[in-house]
Every structure is written in structure tokens, then in C-alpha cells.
Image (tube, rainbow, N blue to C red):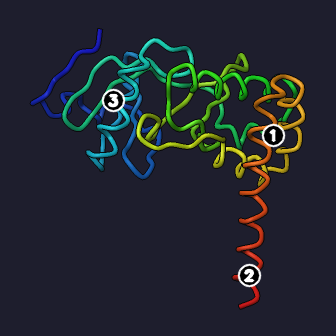
Amino acid sequence: MIEKNKHKKNPYDLSKCKFMGKGNNGEVYLLPNGRVIKIAYNVKSFVGEYTILEKVNGNIYFPLIYEIGPNYMVRECVYGMVLPQYIKENGMNTILAHNIIELLKEFSKLKFKKIDIRCRDIFVQFDGSLKVIDPKKFYSKKRTFPKHLSKGLSKLGVLDIFFKVLEEDEPELYKKWYLETDKYINSTISNLQYRTYI
């Protein structure tokens, strides 16, 4: 059960917590009990994030959420390595590609409108399983193919491996996603070349 403190500001002494990092929307600290607290900069984005985490609480791909306040949330600590760093150090293999495909299929099962995620929002855990951090606009923004994910995998030079596994695992999804992705990637390259020469 999620504890909700609608009127209480962050009750935790951050001087006793380990600073874990910060992004565009907030700072994250490790609490003495092994959970993490996220302090929000942008309350609108923060509300969108915890609303998604509330709806999917208990799903294996998302960190458990324990407590919500007006500008903070306490959730499970996600260990492992962010996907781009993991690929740079270990490369892309069939198992990792398969796990990413299963993650995207889970998005459909959860009735997300956005079947996409940025590479930096996926953590590869020590056992090879995946966790999503900083979920954004999954219920509000419609996207039928993994646009940002494909762009990230393309920059890392492993998009072809991902699509090879997708074609073997899910030929129908391959047909659907490959055409959209190819069109997007090629238009991005064309726009970059156009901007370079004008």
C-alpha cells in the first residue's frame, strides 16, 4: 500500500542520505533503509511520473513506490547500469534485445499509448532484467513504435542487431516497427545533412 502525505513536505533528513544523482525533474537520495527518495523540481512532471508508477505498482519492470508527498516520492532503489553505458561496455546480444522487446510488449499489455522509451530511462540489472526509471507520458502521448529507443540504439550502433532479433521473435511487430523506424531515422539523417549545408 502506498502512503500518501498530501500536505507534508519531505520529512526526511537529507544530510543523512547519500546523494545518488539528479536529472531535469529532480534529485535522488539513498535513504538509510535502502529505499530512495526523489525530490521534485517540476511538480507537473513529478505528478505525471508518480501517477504512472501508482498505476503499475508491483509490475516487474518498474520500481515499487512506497510513499508520495507533495514534492517527493519514496520508491525502490534501482541498481545496475543505464542501458547506453551497459551497451558500450558489453555490446548488444540476443538476450538483451529479447528483454527490450518483452519490455515494449509489456507497455502494450499495460495499455500505454506510448510504446517508446529513451535508452537512458532503462536500467540493466545485475541479473540482466530491465527496470524503467523516470516514466514519462505513457498514458497521454500516443506513439505506436519505439522512436526514441531506436534513435538511441542507432547512435550506439546496435539497431540492426535489435531488429534482427525482433524479426525472429516477433515478425508482425518487425514489419510494423521497421518501416516507421526506417522512415524516422532516414528523415533525421536528411534533416541533419540539410542543416549542415545551408
Of residues 37 and 190, the one nearer the viewer is 190
Rendering coords of residue 83 (x, y %): 68, 37
Which one is earlier in the sequence, the residue at label 1 or at label 2?
1
Of residues 184 and 196, the one nearer the viewer is 184
Which one is earlier in the sequence, the residue at label 3 or at label 1?
3
The residue under the point 79% across, 24% down is: 98
* Rendered image: mark on residue 194: 2
The residue under the point 31% across, 29% down is: 73
Q: Nearer the viewer, mark 3 or mark 1?
A: 3
Determine which residue is flagged by label 1.
Answer: 89
The answer to whether marks 3 and 1 mark residues whose Cβ atoms lie closer than 8 Å is: no
Rendering coords of residue 78 (x, y %): 53, 25
Amino acid type of disc 3? Answer: Thr
Above-or-below relation of 72 to 148: above
Q: Quadrant of the N terminus?
A: top left
The residue under the point 42% across, 52% down is: 24
* Rendered image: mark on residue 183: none
* Rendered image: mark on residue 51: 3
Question: Left of 106 or right of it: where is 94?
Answer: right
How would you rate the neighbour count of disc 1 (Cα within 10 Å): few for under 14, some for 14-19, many for 20 or more?
A: few
